[in-house]
Amino acid sequence: MSLREIVLYPDPVLRRPAREVERFDAELERLVEDLAETMYAAPGVGLAAPQIGVSLRAAVVDVGGAAGRPELHVLVNPRLVESEGRQREDEGCLSIPGLSERVDRPRRVVVEALDARGGALRIAGEGLLARAICHELDHLDGILFFERLTGLRKELTLRRLRKLPYLQQATA
Ligand code: NI
């Protein structure tokens, strides 16, 4: 297991819909473990495989972050099966450091997914967990959180995005 480098916007891998995982082998277990390590080190509450440059439908989420990882959720080939209510809270992304904005998400979701060994999982989440799950599912479809905004708030956020310090350095 090892820490991976987090890919930053505007890397094209972040905009590409990721492929279904087909092989449940040691390589996938390593990928999931690296995702978890990299998420905790960041620190963050979720990380998707495209964010470490791997275009596969795998992600991890942990909104608790406690020792022993009691709240670590592994999401391989996840599928949203229930969604209800609405919440609007601040959201950011490890791939877009320095940007955050309030994003509408469902208040409660249920996802079905597989673990790194192909075992079936069903995860129900509310509040921050629901938000984190939706954010990571979006990553697997190549969607970044600012694309969930509309109207003036989207325009203003895009303007802030273009002025982010790390992007200025990249083009200087
Ligand atoms: Ni993100």
Image (spheres, rainbow, N blue to C red):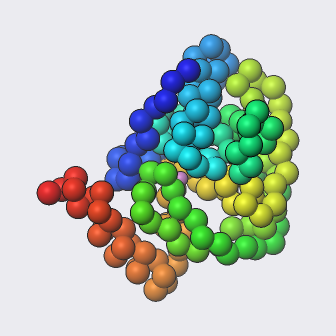
When asked about the image quadrant of residue 120, the answer is: top right
Rendered residue at 74%/21% (across/down) = 117
Residue 113 lies left or right of residue 102; in this view the side is right
Whether residue 10 is situated above or below residue 164 in the rendered picture: above
Q: Position of residue 53 (x, y in %)?
A: 43, 35
Where is residue 118, by image quadrant?
top right
Q: Position of residue 64 (x, y in %)?
A: 74, 49
Q: Position of residue 107 (x, y in %)?
A: 78, 67
Residue drawn at the location 44% of the way across and 47% of the way down = 14
Residue at far top of view: 26
Residue in front for this viewpoint, 164 or 59: 164
Residue at the extreme bottom: 152
Q: Is residue 74 left or right of residue 159?
A: right
- In the image, taking residue 97 as reference, residue 61 lies left or right, namely right
Q: Quadrant of residue 70?
A: top right
Say which residue appears at 67% left-offset and 75% top-offset.
Answer: 88
Could you tell me which residue is drawn at 62 percent across and 47 percent down?
A: 46
Residue 137 visible within the image: no
Residue closest to the far front:
67
Residue 32 drawn above or below residue 129: above
Of the 4 image quadrants, the one containing the N terminus is: top right
Is residue 43 rendered to the left or right of residue 172?
A: right
For the C terminus, give its image quadrant.
bottom left
| Residue 98, x across and y down, in percent | 42, 63
